[in-house]
Structure formats: C-alpha cells, structure tokens
C-alpha cells in the first residue's frame, strides 16, 4: 500500500508538470490577448508596449519563459506576480482559498447527505409516490442551470432582495471569512451550498438508486436476509456498502473540481474564491494568475483522485493494492 | 380669510415651495438634503479599479473609486463643470513665451497621509509624478498623448536623461513646464487635470518604482479626503484585488483648501457582484450607490424605469459608439462605400440592442455632447450630411452611394469582409444587427465574435490583422478635450503595430497637418472652431460611423444621493455624493 501511494505521489508530480506545460502552451504561446498592450493603456506608443513586454519577460523565447517559471515554482513555490495588479499570485490564491474550500466542503456535505439519503429511500421504496416525486425533482435539479438557480434563489429567499426574505439567508456579497464571524459565514453560504449541491444531489441520488436496486437483487443479499439479519442491516451493511463505490469515486472527483473553483456560484453570490479569480484573470490575460489557478485546480483534482483510490481499499474488501 | 391674505399666503407658500425645490435641485436632484457622515456601500461588477498606482489611473472606475476620493490633483473637476478647478494649484496655469511656457503656483500646507504626515506637497513632487508617468514600470496610457511636447521627454524616455528638463520646480511652490511648441491641452490646464499630476514624493517613491512593475501604489501616500485603509507605516491593508476596497478618512486632509465636501465617513467597495443582483441590491437596499458599471442589464433597467425612476441617474457620458471601417481594405478605401454603409445602418435598431433611448442619443457627427467644439460642429443637429441625417436605414440613399462607388446595381459583389465583434451582450447583439442591416447593399461579412480584449489586442488594434470592420468600438474624451477625440483616432502619425486606436488607418497628410495645427491653438474659442472643423472632416469621410452618443445610467438607494461627474462620463463622484 505504501509503495502504491509513493508511486501515485510521483505520478502527481508528473501530472502537475504536464498540466503546467499544457497551460503554458495554451495561454503563453497562444494567448487570447496581448498582456503588454492591455497594460499600456488605451492609446499606447510602440516603445512603451515593447518596454512593458520586456519588463514582463514576454520578449524572451517561450522555452526560456517556461524554464524561468518552473524554476521559480519548484525552487521557491513562487507563482510570480499578477500582470494586472502586480500582487503575488500565491498570496492572492491563498487569500481566496478559504472561500473556495468553504463553498466546496459545505456543498459536498449537503449533496452527499441529500443525494445518498434520497437515493437509498428511493431504492428501497421503489415506485412509491416518494420515489416518483424525488426522482422527478432530481430531473428538475439536474436540468436547472446553476446560474439561473442561484439568481432565482436570491430573488425568492435572500434577506436583502428576496420576495419572501428569510432573515438567516444572507444575500450576495455578504460572505465573510469564518475567522471573522462564523455566524455570518454560515448564513452567507447556506444558499450557495444548496444551489451548488442541487444538481450533484440529484445525480448522486439517481446513481445510488440504480446501483442499490441492482445490488439488492444480488444473491448475497438474499443470503443475508436468509440468515435472519434485520432489513436495516441488510440494506446498510451489505447493500449500500457495495452500491456506494461509484458515488465515492464521483464525490472525490467532484470535490476536487469544486475546490478548484466554482465560477458560477462564486459570481452569482459574489464569493471571492478561486473560480472567480480564474475567470477574471482569463478576461484580463493575466497569464501568471491563469497558470497559478489552473495548477491549484489540477492539484486538487489529482489529490482528490488519489484519496478516492486509497479509500476504495477500505470500502471494498475486494480491492487490494500491491 | 380675506382674499388678499389668502393670495399672500398662497404666494408665500408657492415661493417657499419654489425655494425648497431649487434648494433640492441644487443639492443634486430628487429631494433630500446631503447628510454628513455615514458609510457608503458600493457594489462593483466589472473588476473594480485597474491599479493602485495613480500613475496608471485612466479609466472610469479608477477615477471614481480612488482618483477623486483619495488624492488631490493639480487641477480637479467639479461634478457639473467642464473646466478644470485649481486643487493643489492656486489658480489656472499662466502661459508665456508664446504658449510654450506654462507656470503653475501651488498651494502651501497640503499634507500627505502617514507615514509622511509631517511633509507637505512641493512642486518637485508633481514634477516627479509627471516624470514617472513615462516609466514603463508604471504603464501610463496617456502621457505620450498630452505631455510628449514637453522639452526633454524624448531624452528621458530613452534613458539619456534622468529627469525631464522641461519640467522645473524652481521653488517649493512653483512648477514650470516648457514645451517645444505651444500645447493647448497644457495652457488650458486640461491635461494638468489628470492623475499624472497627483503629487508623488520622489525620495519616498523611487525605491518602489524600481523593478519590473512599480509597487508604489501599494505603499502610496494620500492627499485627498480619504485614504485606502492602511497600517500607517506605508502599507495598504484595505484593498484586495477584485474583492474589496475600503476607504477611510485621511486625517492629514485639509478641508479648508479643498473644494470637495466629502460627506461620507467611510466607503466600502465590494467586488465583484453579478450585475443583475448588484443592480437589484442597490435599488432595494440602503446606503448604496452603483459602482463600476455604465448601465444596469437591460431587463433591470426597464423595470427600474417603470418602478423606481427617481433612483436612476441618467447623464450623457461624453462618449460615443461607432463602427470602424478600415480604409486600407477594399472596398472600404472608397469614401462612397463608407457613406453607403453609414446610410444603410438603422441606428435606432442598433440602440435598441443596448436598451433603447435611455442609453443615449443617436449621433449625427463624431463629437459627443460636452466635448469642446461640439456646438461649433453643429450640436445635436450635426453638420447635415445626408448619410448621417437619418436615424433609421435609408436604403435608397445607400444604394445611390454604392452606384457612385462604381457598383451599378447598388450592391457590393466582392468577397466577404472580415468583421470582428465582441462576444458579450449587448455589444454582440449590436454587431449581429449591423451584420443584417448591411446585407441591403450586398455586404457579406466574414463575421467573428471574440472576447473584448481579444477583439482589441489581437484584431481591431493590430493593422496587420487586416480587419475590415470593427462594429463594437467607442471612445470618450479626456477632460472634454476635442484633441483627445481626434488626434489618437485619426492622425496617421498614431498608426502603430499594436494597440492602434486609429483602427480606420486614416493617414491623410492634409488631415495630419490640420490636427497638428489645431493642437497648437491655445485660445479656447479658436481651438474649439479648429477642432469642430476637423470633426466635420472626419464625419464627412465616414472613417468611423458614429451611431450613439452614450448615456451613463447609475443607480442609487432610496436614502442615497449620487452626484454624477461630467468629467468622469457621468459616473458618481463619491466625494460629492451623500446620504439623504
């Protein structure tokens, strides 16, 4: 197991290197806009543009630029400075990380609880009214775009602009860090958590329902029942444990993606997270910031993937790493 | 009650009401007196300020959020005025030597914020501020336009001189600027009312101006009524890019020598809200004024016009929107084809894509209202060119111009023209409407929609990209100066390989000479006439087809009164705004 983890960790390094290289190629070699011209104001002269290009190091060859970037990153964990505001990329990412973690973890808790709960109930009460209602609702949740759902939830329930304001559901722009005020932090994130979790919950519920229905028809479930185990024990110890593996895979990867930023939710609810930072930096051709946010996002996904693989060994006795 | 007393009472009440009404209007608009104190909240949607560095500030949100509030300029701008007001300067500049020397006396006793609270502003600080605007690490976008005629600028830019010899500070209170030729933008004070004249103490700032990019902005000292929250030791703590900007009162500010009332105690600016949500929050909330957006999304605007019109501030932005036609690409090298396009477009329909009449007035010539020379150029009626006179499409006229251009059928029959448009609403819809309209004269467009920054820096502003038509461009005057509307956009001397704003690539020696002559006119009345003549010339040639004189639509909460600044395209000036 230890050898497996070490091998996977080495792959993490290789993958991050590849991601950095591909990101560099996309954004530095084929940038969507010229950062030097953007920095030089609305009516620049060529001399100024070239001087800015030189100052930003954009006049060097692409391999040279990439080597410089990786050297700083590997030796000093330095992502460079934003072209837009000349503030350290690392500092800005670390500044915004708590907000993204808050959104991601909170919504993961919501979608796991609701998704797994609804999935189990629907599977064991198959074709009941409750099953039909929750599966119908799940279709709506999957189909509703997050951006639209966010706006609708704000217009309906937010304490500032809602038609039916709920006092503890704070509106957009009310996010404060947990360390500053835990109560406001919680209230400002309730709506984003549920909005973000809606489609994930629905997907997980449908996935688990399908898996559980299939699992519950297996021979070993019949055997468990024949042994006189309680239905609750049969469902949870034998049925769910087996059916939940795909959910764990999906949840791990989804959490990684969410930690890397949730652009739409962060935008609608004005939460200063990594996703919004990535979006703004792409708009401004802020290449070091794009590179930094992409690498952080990739790191989360790769690590989440690794954790999921390791968890398999604990969840499924059939899985053994050697 | 006797009739006479009743009449007297009615007269008194009427007079009183009139006085109250006038007082209310004088306070800036729809009722409620300005209240001192309180915290203003501002919701930004588009990324807030571009930079902390005063030497970089050039755009609407920079001026609005930090330029007017935290710093004093050599010359400032009262919200409703179009002429500069002495701020750090004692009076308007004095010109001598045939307009080639400009002398400005500055006020004494204007202090900096901590950690330089014991120091006062000296003329040498403004000299350094102007010089650093030419440093690439500052990245200023207008110094070359307005200050390049100052003696010694070329030597300073090339690194041959450590200072600009034409800017001198013979004593602490005197600034002298010598130019190679008369420069109307300097003698009139307009170009000295730009953030490059915000004082920067050289001995303090120079260490931050080293390296790849200046970091002075993050350590700057303030002279205005507010300062960005800081630790008092020269480090800003109240700014997180695209998150928050906190302005607090500057204890070093001398109210007696400033023309700004600065009512609020604190200004909290939050970025970056969704535009629709921000607009709704502003309209239904308290203590809120809109931030860095020129107009709310169309559905919100329509709703607000019906329900909360008194919370909208609609003012001319002093800018225009135009369609650029590249004169180096056939058939747009033919003036009659360009005029045909001007005649065929339906400007009313184009305006509708942005939200309708609230968003502006249909243009009849290039200069927008408020610019020097606008009235001399025909005002709203315009110079009377037939291809610019109709607000809707005039296909017959357009076809007649196409026939004059040699297309006997009245329709173009050549290859498709490369057209690069913005891919974001409402500009996207404007471009798509334009694409449909020009089909009437046979113009087939090779139409591509790309992000705004890409549109400018990879296509429209890059001559070698050979883009024929850019339908989503706009321009606004700096300090109401007609020069800033004409020289960058139409002078062939300004065609550059990248960042080229002369997108039509006009290079007419006669026009260039006329522009250079107008730049040297220092008499304001004569200058206005000279620029108006140029406005007529460029409109006549239809290099650009101006179709809208833009309005700025700002929002305010029911208990807040925003005061729009003419200088800053109609955006609220927070140093004059207040709670009711």
Image (cartoon, coloured by chain):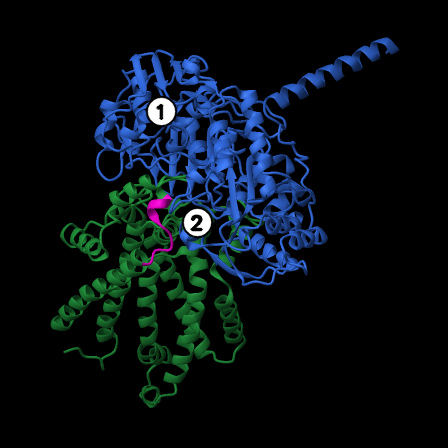
Dot label at residue B60: none
Mark 1 crowd level (few <14, some 14–19, many ≥20, 10 Å Cα): many
Q: Would you identify the image quadrant in which residue B22 lies?
A: top right
Q: Which chain is green?
A: A
Q: Residue at x 67, y 21 (%)?
A: B21
Residue A228: % across, % down = 33, 86
B137 on left or right of B468: left
Q: In the depicted view, which residue is nearer to us: A179 or B116?
A: B116
A156 vs A82, left or right, is right
Q: Which residue is mark 1?
A: B150
The quadrant in which the C terminus of chain B is found is top right
Residue A81 in percent (x, y) is at 26, 45
* Residue for point 50% across, 41% down: B293
> Horizontally, is B118 left or right of A273 in the view?
left
**Element carrying mark 2:** helix
- Residue placed under numbered mark 2 in the picture: B456
Give whichever of A137, B506 is nearer the camera: B506
Region of the chain picked out in magenta, as a range: A30-38
């Amino acid at each position: 197991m230890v050898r497996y983890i070490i091998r996977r960790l080495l792959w993490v390094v290789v993958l991050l290197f590849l991601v950095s290289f591909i990101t560099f190629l996309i954004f530095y070699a084929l940038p969507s806009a010229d950062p030097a011209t953007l920095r030089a104001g609305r009516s620049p002269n060529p001399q100024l543009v070239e001087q800015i290009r030189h100052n930003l190091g954009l006049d060097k060859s692409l391999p040279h630029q990439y080597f410089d970037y990786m050297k700083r990153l590997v030796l000093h964990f330095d992502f460079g400075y934003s072209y837009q505001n000349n503030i350290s990329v690392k500092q800005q990412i670390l500044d915004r990380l708590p907000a993204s973690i808050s959104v991601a973890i909170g919504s993961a808790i919501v979608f796991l609880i609701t998704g797994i709960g609804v999935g189990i109930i629907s599977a064991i009460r198959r074709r009941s009214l409750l099953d039909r209602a929750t599966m119908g609702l799940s279709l709506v949740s999957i189909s509703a775009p997050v951006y639209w759902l966010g706006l609708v939830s704000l217009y309906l329930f937010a304490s500032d602009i809602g038609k039916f304001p709920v006092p503890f559901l704070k509106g957009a722009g009310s996010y404060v860090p947990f360390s500053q005020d835990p109560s406001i932090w919680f209230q400002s994130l309730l709506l984003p958590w549920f909005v973000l979790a809606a489609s994930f919950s629905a997907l997980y519920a449908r996935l688990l329902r399908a898996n559980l229905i299939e699992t519950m028809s297996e021979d070993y479930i019949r055997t468990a029942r024949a042994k006189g185990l309680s239905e609750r024990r049969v469902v949870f110890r034998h049925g769910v444990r087996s059916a939940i593996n795909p959910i764990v895979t999906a949840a791990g990867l989804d959490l990684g993606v969410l930690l890397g930023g949730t652009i739409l939710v962060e935008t609608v609810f004005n939460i200063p997270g990594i996703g919004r930072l990535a979006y703004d930096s792409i708009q401004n051709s802020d290449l070091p910031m794009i590179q930094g946010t992409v690498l952080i996002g990739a790191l989360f996904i790769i690590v989440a993937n690794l954790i999921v693989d390791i968890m398999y060994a604990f969840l499924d006795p059939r899985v053994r790493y050697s | 009650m006797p009739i006479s007393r009743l009449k007297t009472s009615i007269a008194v009440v009427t007079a009183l009401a009139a006085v109250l009404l006038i007082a209310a209007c004088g306070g800036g608009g729809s009722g409620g007196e300005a209240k001192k104190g309180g915290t203003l909240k501002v919701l930004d949607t588009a990324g807030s300020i571009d930079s902390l560095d005063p030497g970089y500030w050039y755009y609407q949100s920079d001026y609005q959020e930090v330029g007017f509030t935290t710093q004093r300029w050599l010359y400032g701008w009262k919200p409703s005025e179009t002429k500069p007001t002495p701020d750090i300067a004692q009076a308007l500049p004095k010109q001598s030597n045939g307009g080639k020397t400009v002398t400005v006396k500055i006020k004494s006793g204007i202090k900096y914020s901590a950690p330089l609270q014991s120091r006062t502003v000296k003329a040498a600080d403004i000299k350094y501020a102007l010089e650093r605007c030419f440093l690439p690490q500052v990245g200023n976008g207008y110094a070359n336009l307005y200050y390049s005629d100052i003696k010694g600028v070329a030597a300073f830019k090339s690194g041959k001189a450590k200072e600009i010899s034409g800017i001198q500070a013979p004593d602490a209170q005197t600034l002298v600027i010598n130019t190679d030729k008369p420069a109307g933008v300097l003698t009139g004070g307009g170009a000295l009312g730009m953030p490059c004249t915000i004082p920067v103490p050289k001995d303090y700032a120079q260490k931050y101006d080293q390296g790849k990019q200046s970091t002075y902005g993050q350590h700057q000292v303030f002279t205005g009524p507010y300062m960005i929250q800081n630790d008092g030791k020269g480090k800003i703590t109240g700014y997180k890019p695209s998150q928050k900007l906190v302005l607090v009162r500057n204890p070093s500010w001398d109210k007696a020598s400033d023309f700004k009332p600065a009512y609020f105690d604190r200004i909290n600016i939050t970025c970056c809200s969704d535009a629709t949500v921000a607009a709704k929050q502003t309209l239904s909330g308290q203590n809120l004024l809109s931030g860095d957006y020129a107009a709310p999304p169309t559905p919100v605007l329509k709703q607000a016009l019906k329900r909360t019109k008194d919370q909208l501030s609609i003012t001319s932005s002093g800018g225009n929107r135009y369609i650029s036609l590249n004169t180096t690409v056939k058939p747009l090298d033919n003036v009659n084809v360009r005029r045909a396009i001007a005649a065929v477009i339906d400007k009313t329909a184009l305006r509708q894509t942005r939200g309708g009449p609230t968003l502006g007035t249909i243009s009849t010539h290039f200069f927008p209202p408020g610019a020097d020379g606008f009235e001399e150029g025909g005002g709203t009626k315009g110079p009377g060119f037939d291809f610019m006179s109709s607000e809707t499409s005039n296909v017959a006229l357009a076809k007649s111009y196409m026939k004059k251009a040699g297309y006997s059928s009245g329709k173009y029959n050549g290859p498709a023209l490369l057209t690069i448009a913005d891919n974001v609403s409402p500009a996207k819809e404007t471009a798509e409407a334009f694409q449909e309209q020009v089909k009437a004269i046979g113009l087939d467009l090779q139409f591509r929609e790309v992000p705004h920054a890409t549109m400018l820096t990879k296509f429209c502003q890059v001559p070698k990209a050979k883009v024929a038509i850019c339908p989503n461009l706009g321009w606004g005057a700096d300090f109401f100066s007609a020069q800033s509307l004409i020289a960058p956009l139409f002078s062939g001397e300004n065609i550059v390989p990248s960042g080229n704003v002369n997108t039509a690539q006009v290079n007419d020696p006669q026009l260039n000479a006329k522009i250079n002559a107008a730049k040297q006119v220092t008499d304001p009345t004569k200058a206005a006439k000279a620029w108006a003549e140029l406005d007529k010339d460029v409109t006549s040639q239809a290099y650009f087809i101006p179709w809208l004189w833009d309005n700025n639509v700002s929002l305010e909460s029911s208990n807040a009164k925003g005061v729009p600044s003419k200088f800053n395209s109609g955006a609220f000036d927070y140093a004059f705004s207040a709670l009711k």
